Image (cartoon, rainbow, N blue to C red):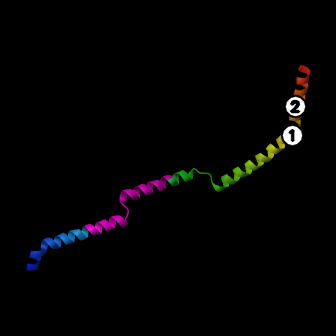
Amino acid sequence: MELLREWWTVIYAVALNLVLLILVLLSKTYARREELDKVSKNVADLTEQMKHLPSHQDVQNLRLELSETRGELRELKAEIKPINHLAQLLLEQQLKQDK
């Protein structure tokens, strides 16, 4: 008991330093509540945004429609080519007549 009365300030200081050291190590190891809440909010926001993205089936349907549209454009190009040729000939004829 005598030893405790003599060294109580040193024991108290060492105990406080140990507690502070443990707190510092815990703060380095574990995330703070605010940081965890922020990350949870970000994950929730991303999840909400992902709900509005097109599904795999939607993207596949769009690709199919785009492919069909390309084919239709090629057909139209083939049909328009003779009409364009006739328009060029008519333009040349009109320019020759105007001279």
Question: Where's residue 82, x and y in %?
Answer: 89, 37
Give yes or no for residue 49 being in the magenta stretch.
Answer: no
Residue at image point 17% right, 71% down:
12
Asked if residue 78 can be seen in this view, the reply is yes
Question: Where's residue 28, x and y in %?
Answer: 35, 65
Q: Tell me: residue 95, above or below residue 36.
A: above
Residue at image point 11% right, 77% down:
4
Identify which amino acid the numbered label 2 is placed on: Gln
Along the line of sight, which residue is nearer the eye, 92 or 13?
Answer: 92
Residue 79: which numbered mark, if any? 1
Along the line of sight, which residue is nearer the eye, 33 or 91?
Answer: 91
Q: Chief secondary structure of the magenta span? A: helix
Identify which amino acid the numbered label 1 is placed on: Glu
Residue 88: which numbered mark, if any? 2
Residue lying furthest front in this view?
99
Along the line of sight, which residue is nearer the eye, 44 or 70?
Answer: 70
Label 1 sits on a secondary structure element that is helix
Residue range highlighted in magenta = 20-45
Q: Tell me: residue 72, above or below residue 59.
A: above
Q: Which of marks 2 and 1 is in front?
A: 2
Name the image quarter holding residue 1: bottom left
Residue at image point 76% right, 46% down:
69
First-in-chain label (2 vs 1): 1
Name the image quarter holding residue 6: bottom left
Label 2 sits on a secondary structure element that is helix
Question: Where's residue 16, x and y in %?
Answer: 21, 68
Asked if residue 1 can be seen in this view, the reply is no
The quadrant of the rendering that contains the C terminus is top right
Please tell me how crowded label 1 is: few (under 14), some (14-19), or many (20+) other residues with Cα within 10 Å: few
Q: Tell me: residue 31, above or below residue 68.
A: below
Residue lying furthest left in this view?
2
